[in-house]
Amino acid sequence: MGHAYFYALLGVSVFVLALHALIHNVNLLRKILAVNVMCSGVFLVLVALASRTSGVVDPVPHAMVITGIVITVSATALALTLMLRLYQATGDNQLSDGSGE
C-alpha cells in the first residue's frame, strides 16, 4: 500500500470519527467543529488521491481543496454567528427537538 492510499485511508477515518461526533453531540459548537474536521478529512482524501499515476499530479483536486478551504471558513463564520444569535436569544446553545416541552 502506497503513501497516497495510506493518507486517503487516514482521511476517511478522520471523516468517520467526525461524523460520529456530529451525530452524538448536542452542543452546537461541537457540531460546528465536527463539520470542520469532516471537511479536513475530505481535503486529505482529495490531495492524497491527486497523484494516482506515477509521477503525474492532477492539479484539479488541489484547486478544489483551496476553494473548499475558503468556503469552509466562510460557512464556519456563518454557523458561529448563527450559534451566537441563538445563544443570545434563548440562553442555550443546543437545538430543541421541537416538541415544545
Image: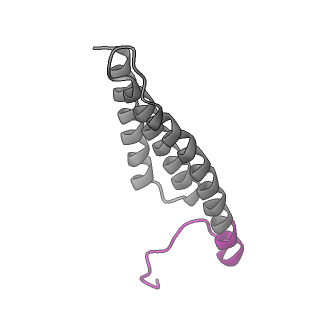
Which of these two is toward me, 31 or 37?
37
Image vertical order of residue 17 relative to residue 53, above or below:
below
The percent position of residue 85, horizontal first and vertical second, equals 69, 72
Q: Is residue 41 above or below residue 96?
A: above
The structure's colour scheme is one colour
Q: Which residue corresponds to the image point at 64% horizontal and 63% vertical from the top-left? A: 78
Magenta stretch encompasses residue 97: yes
Horizontal arrangement in the rendering, residue 80 relative to residue 34 (left or right): right
In the image, the segment drawn in magenta is 84-101
The residue closer to the viewer here, 100 or 37, is 37
Percent across and percent down for residue 89 are 68, 78
* 82 is higher (above) or lower (below) than 48: below
Prevailing secondary structure class for the magenta stretch in the rendered image: loop
Q: Residue at x 43, y 23 (%)?
A: 57
As for residue 100 lying within the magenta part, the answer is yes
Residue 44: image location, x then y, percent: 45, 32
Q: Which of 6/46 is in front?
A: 46
Which image quadrant is residue 49 in?
A: top left
Q: Quadrant of residue 28?
A: bottom right
Quarter of the image that includes the N terminus: top left
Residue sticking out furthest to the bottom: 100
Residue 1 falls left or right of residue 87: left
